[in-house]
Every structure is written in C-alpha cells, then in structure tokens.
Amino acid sequence: MLANGRYSEALGAWQLALEKCSKPTRMAEYIALHLSEEALKMIGKKEVTEAKRYVEYALQLQPTDKQIIARYGMVHKAYYEYLIGLGESSAMLDDVKKHLEKPALKSLILHTADSVSSILGLEESLASINTAITIKKKLIEWDNNSEYHATLAMAYAELYEYKRVRDVTAPEIESILREIIKYGQSGYNGLKQAKFGYFDVHLTLLQAMNATGKYDDVQKQAGAELGSAAQAMSKKIQKSYRKILADSYAGQKKYDLAEAEYKTLVSLDPSDRQTQSSFADMLTEAGKYDVAKGMLQQLLVNADQPADYISRIGKIELLNGRYAEASFQLEKAIEADPSVSMNYGYLAEAYDLAGNTLKAQDNYEVAINYLERTLNNVNRNNLTATDMGLLRSKREKYIMAAARISTEKGEKEEAGVYYEKLTQINPKSAAAWHGLGNVYVQSGRIYDALASFDKALSLESDNKTYSASFTNTIQLREDALKNQTPLAIVDIHVKDIYPALFKNYADIRQLPLGNVTLANNTADMILPTSVSVFIADFMSQPTPVSCTGINGYSNDKLKISAILPEKILENAEKKSLTVEVVISYVRNGATETIRKSTVFNLHGRNAITWSDKRLLAAFVSPQDQQFIAFAKDVDAFYRTSPSYGMNKSILKAMQLYTILEDAGIAYSADPNQSYSKVSMHGDQLDFLQFPSETFQRKGGDCDDLVALMSSVMENSGVPTAYIDVPGHVMVAFDCGIKAADLKASGLDNKEVVVIGDHVWIPVETTLLGSKNFMIAWKSGADRFYEELHAGHFPELIPMSDAWKFYQPSSYSQPGFDLKMNASKKATDTYDALVNQLVAKTRNQAVVEMRNRYNTEPNNTYVMNNYAMLMAQTGNLREAERVFLDALKINSDDASVLNNLGNIAYLEGNYKVAISYYEQANGFDAEDADILINLCRANLAAGNKAAASEWYNKAVTLNAETGDLYIHLKTQLK
Amino acid sequence: MKQTLLTLFLLAMVQVCFTQNDVAGKVVYYEGKVETGKDPNWTRVKINFPVKKNEMIKTAPDATAEIVWNNGTKTIVGPGSKLEINSLLTASSGNSKAATEGVFGEFMTVFKTGPGSKRTEEGGIRRTEVDKKEKEELYWKQDKPVSFAEAFGFYENKDYGKAITALQAFINQQPQDDMSKYAMFALGHSDIMSNNSVKAKEIFQNFVLLYANDPLKADAEKVLALI
C-alpha cells in the first residue's frame, strides 16, 4: 500500500494490526520506528501531511525514544516549511503552541520553528521577512531565549537589506536599525554570557551601528573582540570584524586608519579579490587615485568580468581630470558590457569635458534615457534612497549639459525639449527657464520666451542676464505687432514618420504627426475656421484637423494628424517629403488664409526606434489572415498527437515553436545593427522585420523572432507579451493558469513570471534553430530572473496593452504565400517535448493535489481532480478509492460517475463502465462527451448497435462532436 | 350506479380544485438535477413543472432552477439547496431587496477600493477553434474551474442567475481562497436579488459562523436583521 501511495490505508492497517494484537511492546517499538522512518521518506516525496500523521502516531507509541523524537523534529520542520509555503504561518504557530505544555518537545519544536522562520527570513520577499519577524516575536513571547533575540535581530537585518534598496523613507530605515540594535544587543549579551556562538549576531549588530553612525562604539566593540577572541574566530569572522572596523574609520574619514585595516585584511587573504576591490573604492574616496587605479589594474588581470574594473578605472581618470584617457577606458568598458547604462553618463561627461560635444551628446541621451527609466520604474530593487538622490541630480546635470550642447549646435527643437524637461523636473531652476526662453527666441516664439524669462526672473530677480533677455524680447514683440499678420505660422514640426505606425498618425490622441506653432499677434482670441494637412506624394486629399481658439499674444501649439494610406508600407527606403499646413480664419469680417510647408523624413517600412518599447507591437497583428490560416494548418497537423491533458496554451506554444524550427527559422544576429546596441539608444534606428518577412527570410534578430513568435501565437489565440531587458527582448505567453493554481499545475515560480493573476511563460526565441522549446523556456526564465536580481528591471509588456497605444499593421511581400510544410521530425520532436512536459509537471501536480486533498478531504472538486491525476498516472486503485469517497459525499456528481466509468473501462469492465456512464448521463444529459464514452464502452463490449445509438445522440446534442470523433464513426461502420 | 358515478366525479373535481389551489408556480428553467416533493418521495422536474406550496425543492450541487410564481414574480434557486416552496413563495415579494440595499452598496465600495482594485482579467487561449482537435483519448470529466473574477463579474453585471451558480462553484472549489468570503457575501446578495431570501438567510448565517472575526461579519448581521 505504501509503495502505491496509499498512505492512509497503510497507517490504518498498522493501527489495526496493533489493536488486534493488544499492542505488544516489541511490535509497538518496531512499528513506531518503521513509521518514523517511512515519515522521513515521505518528506522526500513532499507528502508532509501524511508524514506528520505517521510520526505523531510513532511518538504516541514510543514517547521517550530519542530517535523518534529527533525524527519528530525533522518531520515537523518539513511540515512547517510546507505550511509557510502555503502562507499558513498562523497554522504553524498554532501547531507550535500545542507543544508548549509538552516539556520533552517544547524546546525542540520552538527551535524548529525558529530555524524555519530564519530560512524564511532569507527569502527576498517582504511578506516572508515580515512573517519571519512575527514568528520570532511570538517565540520570544513563549520563551525569552537569547537565541531567538539573536535570530530576530538577523531577520530585521534582512528587512533592512530589503528596504534599504527600495527608496523608503529615512525614518523607516532608522526604526529598522533600532530594532536590529535592540535585539542584536540582547541576543549578543545573552549568547556571550551563556558561552554560545555569538559572532554572527554581533557582526550584524556592529553593521547596524555603523549604519547609524555609532562609529566610536563600533571601533570599541570590534577592537575588543579582535583583541580578546581572535583565537576563537575563523579567518572569515576575523575578516568581517576588520572590514566593519575599516568601514567605521572610512565613515569618520579616518582614511589612514581604514587603509591600515584594509592592508591587514589583504594580508590575511591575498587572494580575496572582493576585499581588494573594496580597498580600491576606499582609496578612490580618499583621493588616492593612482594607488586605487593600480590596484584595479592588478585586479583586471584574469578578471572574469573585466567591464566593471575598466569602468572604475575610467571613472578614476575622470575624477583625476584625464578626460581623454577616461573616455578611452569607458568606451572599452561599454564595449565589454553595453548593458551597464551608467557608463554612458560618465563617458558623456568625459567627452564633454574633453570638448568632443558630438560624442558627448550621443552618450548623454543614452544616460538620460536610462536615468528616466530607472527613476520612473516602480520595481527598482537595488537602489538606496541616497542612490536615488544621486541619480536625480545626475539626471538634471546631464539634461542641462545636453540642452547646452543642442543650443550650441543650433538644434532648437532638441534644446527646447531638454529645457522643457528640466523645468518640469526642477521648476525652481532659473537657469533652465532662461535656457528655454533663449530657445524660444531662436524659434520665433516670442510670447513663450517672455513667459520663460519672466519665470527665470521671478526665481532670480537680480540676475542681469535674465533681465536683459526679458527686455530684448519685449522689443521683439513690439516689432512683431507692427510687421506680422494677426495669425502667423511660426513653425511646423513633423517627426520622422514610420510606415509601420501609419494607422496611428490618423488620430491626434494616439500619435500626432507633429505640431504647428502659431503666433497670435493680437490681444483677441482667434478661432481658425479650418486647418488641413496634406502630403502630396502619398495623400489623395488633405486631412482636416480640429482646432480650438488661439489665445491673444500667445504661441499656442496645434497638434496635427494625417490619414495615410496602407500603400505607405511599400516604402522600403528613407526619403524626404513635404507636408503643407493650411489655416483659414476670419478677421474683421474677412477670411484670411495662411499656409506653410516643411520637409520631413519618411522611413522605410522596417524602421523603428526604441524610444518606446511598446512600438514593437505595431509589427504584430492579431488578425493577420495568412497567420490565421497558418495556425489552422498547425492545428490540423497536430490533431492526432496526444496531449495527455496538458495545458493547452503551453502545448500550442510548443507546437508553433517546433513548426517554426522545422521550417528552418533560426536566429541570426545583425552585427551592425543588433538589438543589443540599438535598443540602448532611444533615437537610433533599428531594422525590424514584419513576421512574414522573417518567415520568408528564415530568420532574424531577437526582436524579429519575438515579432514572429508573437504573431503566430496571437493568431492561434494565445495572448503574448514581450520581455524587455537591457539590450535584449524575449517573448512570453499567458498560459491561462491562475497564479493561485501554479503549484497544482506542476510549475515552479522560477519557471514563470507571475504578474497579478496571470502566469506568463518566457521563451528565449533566439534559441530557435539550435535548442528545443523546453530549453528555450528554461533559458527565458533564467534570463528573466538573472536580470531581475542584477537590478536591470526586466519589463513584461503584454501585447494587448501595447496595442492600446499602437495599432498594429501587417505586411507581406507581394506574392508571398505563408505555407506550413512540416516534416515527420516536427511530430517526433513535439511528441518528445510533450513527454518531457508530462514528466516534468504531472508528478509535481500529483503531490500538490494530494496535499490539497489531505487539507480539504471533503472537497469533491479537489477529490475529483486528484483522483483524475492518480488515474492518469496509472494509480487506478487509489483513484477509484477517492472517486468512491467523493460519491459518498455527492452521489449525483456526473463528473465522478463518468470518471469511475473510465476506471472500469481501463480495466476492461465494460459493463460496469456503461452503468457508470449511464448514471453520469442521467445527472448531466447535456454533456455529449459522456455519450461518446458510452459509445466507446459499448463498442468495446461488442454492442455496435448501442454504440451507434449513443454516437448519434451525441452528435444530435452537439454537432461538433461529429468532427471530433471521426475515428469512432469509422469503427461504427 | 348513476349516483356512484356522480359521487366519484364530484370527488375527482374536488381533488382537481384542491390540487390546482395548491400549485404556487412552475419551474420555467433548470440545469442539472432538480427535484420537488418531500422525503423520501422526490420527482425530477421538467420545464413548466408545477411546484406546490406544501412541498420542497431540492437542487444538486451543480444544479439550478428558476421558478415563476402565479403572481408573475421570479425566484432563482441556486446549487445545493433544499428549501420549502411555501417559504420561497412568501419571500418572493422582494421586500428584502430594498431593505438591504444600503448594506450591499457599502460592501461594493469597500470591495472596490480594497481587494477588488487588484483584480486582473483572465488569460489563456482565447479562440475556441484551437480546442477543435480530434479526440482519441477517454473523456475525463472535470468541473470547469471558476475564478473569482469570472464569478464576481456576473454579480457586478447584475446577472444574478449566473452569479449564484458561479459564486457557489467558486466557494465549493476554493473554500480556502482569500476571496471566498467576498464570494459568499455576494452570493447571499444575489439570492436576495433573485427573490430567494430563504437561501440568503442560510448563507449569511453561515457567513457569521465562518468569518466570526471579519469586519464583514457586522454587515452580514445587519442583512440578517433586515431580511
């Protein structure tokens, strides 16, 4: 029974045997030992609730046996871990509480609970750490033991580490540090007095004291420990004490003393690169640039990841005023690892200070984009409040520098954007308002300029430069009033146009084509009677644009749109076009018309920039007729492949990936324009293929393959998303499993990305052509979590969300016909993948479902699902037992009756099967599939006439059944 | 002989009149196993099956029935019910709806600003075409998993008939889910809105017992006092 997983029955049998024999001592000893041993094995199989029942019974039989008590503790540890995994920490505490009155078990169980909560506290999750703290506080309430004080201090230290990097308020951090110091001090005192190991808690305490600036106390305590207990310390502990001591000296800017500690540290372990690296940082902070640089250069030799050392050398050169050398080193660092975005900022500074404004501008833009993204990302998880402050000030500094360079180069539009941004993030920057005013003057926007200079003067009223700018602009306004028309078009700005977005330009709210800056040189509001936009080369008629009134003495802006035809997608190369804006208005009873033209760029259909990552969605159409037909062909191709009841979305993704692979689609990087390089520069052009083009060309870059995979899946009905990480993009799909059902589905948290109630499966599409779907899945998940832990904020963008901003379009080369010509290999590969998936998920799902069954033994929904899984994994006896139990609770359950019929069918008892199916049909006469089971059972029992009758009834009830069970119809003939 | 026949005819007429007076309404819609009668004599209902005042109605855990009373009002009987027809008829006046309106308005406000603000839509395969593949394996029957979002969606859209079935299914399937209490509260309200304050009373009584320490308990007690 045990071998078949029939744990309850087995335990019942042992109990019965003992009762029947009146519990003879030797037999009770043997059974107790055996059951406790079995309980340990069950933990390995994750059958923890059963294991607990076994070991509890074992202890009941032998309450003083030390081996059984030890096993009791081990099983309870697993049980508590299981409860914590379910989020049932209160259930765990209830169980612990039951042991408080049992002297033989109290200490064991309290320590077990403490150990479980300590492990929980190490998880990088706020809920887990808080739960650990709650448990430990409860343990202290029940037993005021120094050990629990010590572990509570360490749990608070985990909370500190968690919060510290999440931009929380200083008071919150200080309160956490106070708790560490409070419990750390009592834990340390108690453990030291009891002569228990106390170094870990003491080190935690000293770190907290360092963080609160209690440097003198730290030096006193650390010095005392190093003086009195150094012999008892391991080398690692000794190093930790010295490192804390060095940090406290550096905190007081006593760099010589810190340097001395570091030298001792290095001498203790000359191979410790981490210590040398920290030493170099300390030296840089102390202004000893050349020594620090020399140390980093030594570390660079044989370094696994040289980019970090090179960039630090570059930063030292920057601090040291050697700008050309700094730019050289930072370029090398970026070449080694383009994803470290802060290096672009340092590089920009180096170029700027070296006078190379062209390169400086380019790198400032990347750095600003990165900083914006970091500062606006709610998921940032590796930045302290101080870091955030530094980043904000860096962003301001870089924007100001970029605005200055743009102004110097005469790029009015760009300079205006930078200054406007600057005035938004820091409205108290008079310099920004003045810069903006200057740009407005250059653009002819004298009314806007006056407002900006006025703002600058309101912030710095004594500034003579600002005052002069204001006076000069007043003069310009006087000239305009005399010489210009009442309403004038000052400027037309049309952005570069991307054909893939052609539908979006028709709607001002979605994506304006550009804007027109007007000057109302009168005191009255002017309401234009018509505004139209016309591009002669592509449009057959002008697009009318709605307009509100233009305020008196203003430079109001007007957004413009254009209805562009689909043929724009045929444009393959970049070209210059002219757009004309015509505005009519009535002045003094007469209609006046003004017009102005400007030249803009139309890109080729594959052009895109990554200024907004959602733009990728414009290349993926969920209603692409060729891909819909392709999806149907794939369905038909895999019609007869077994699915073993696996998740439909995962199977569909597996099929499509395999078919694409079979079609010869493979990853091929474009060395000159790879996504990894281009995506870091928001305004740099990338070449993104439409899915049909990638299919036709048999490959593409990571973004091309994401668009293709997403397209085939969306057109197969599977919602997709893409995951953007620095320099890379991957596809993901919604597998339709609810987050709460993840474990019951046999999937692990680390294999998926859970957002809200949705479970997304990431797939590394660049492995197309080299690795199968399961590996691409694992690789995608690994990459996501690596990036997450590295603090690179991987973002998952559901395609449906992106489409709300960018309407998709689809394009195929004339004459291209998307055909699916799969080989037998595609079937074999897929079948093997399905088997892998079954092996991977089903065992885990059985365990999860069994645990749920044990927790909710009377839930017929759970019973039915659990028993189904048991039956599908070959354990028909256990399945039948659970189904019959379910039937006792609800004798009318059509699902249970049908499934009992299946058990009988699988065992060849066709008459019994028929009886169950008929009962099931009696309770659910609307389910045609039960009738098909009846047909199948009658056919197997040799009753062809009855089988035909049931088949016909099924088809009458649901016409689609006929298509689904063609093979049965054939057998009925 | 003639007199005997006349007596028999009169007796039959009395019986018919008595039976017709006893009919309170009819079942106009049902799903699953629905029976009327008394222990141990139960009869499966069909469409337009008459329901009598002195009998009971019983629905299986996945069944539901809709009764139209002689006065034209409707009552929905949700899954897993066993209720007296007469009580249902008395409760069909709908007085409880107006009486409890304030409590449920408050419930929705609390829900929308609390757990309801975090709900998301369901994902997974959208097109039914994808499921249309030939099946060669045995059919294992499984109750469709019902998510809270789906069940609560019916309730929010005031589709109380569907809400009763879906909310009850969610509670049965996920009794330990954090959202189960909201589902139960909404289920009770759906019953009230379906003129079934008899079942609603049962539900709110259970709610008070199950969620004795929950802030919603006070609201449940308010409802019980009003229906």
Image (tube, coloured by chain):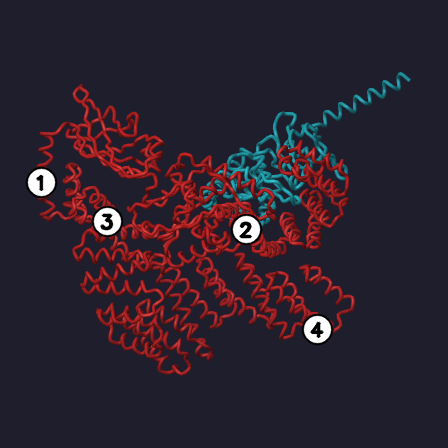
Chain colours: A red, B cyan
Residue A42: which quarter of the image? bottom right
Disc 1 to disc 2, how far (Cα)? 76 Å
In the image, is residue A588 above or below residue A616?
A: above
Within-10-Å neighbours for mark 2: few <14, some 14–19, many 20+: some
Do badges 3 and 2 share one subunit?
A: yes
Q: Earlier in the sequence, mark 1 or mark 3?
A: 3
Q: Earlier in the sequence, mark 1 or mark 4?
A: 4
In the rendered image, which residue does mark 2 sit on? A829
Number of the front mark, 3 or 2:
2
Given the image, what chain letter belongs to the residue carrying mark 2?
A
Label 1: state its secondary structure.
helix
CB contact under 8 Å: marks 2 and 4? no
Q: Which mark is residue A472?
A: 1
Q: Position of residue A453 (x, y in %)?
A: 15, 43
Horizontally, residue A540 falls left or right of residue B45, namely left
In the rendered image, which residue does mark 4 sit on? A29
Q: Position of residue A764 (x, y in %)?
A: 44, 52
Q: Earlier in the sequence, mark 4 or mark 3?
A: 4
The front one of B115 and A645 is: A645
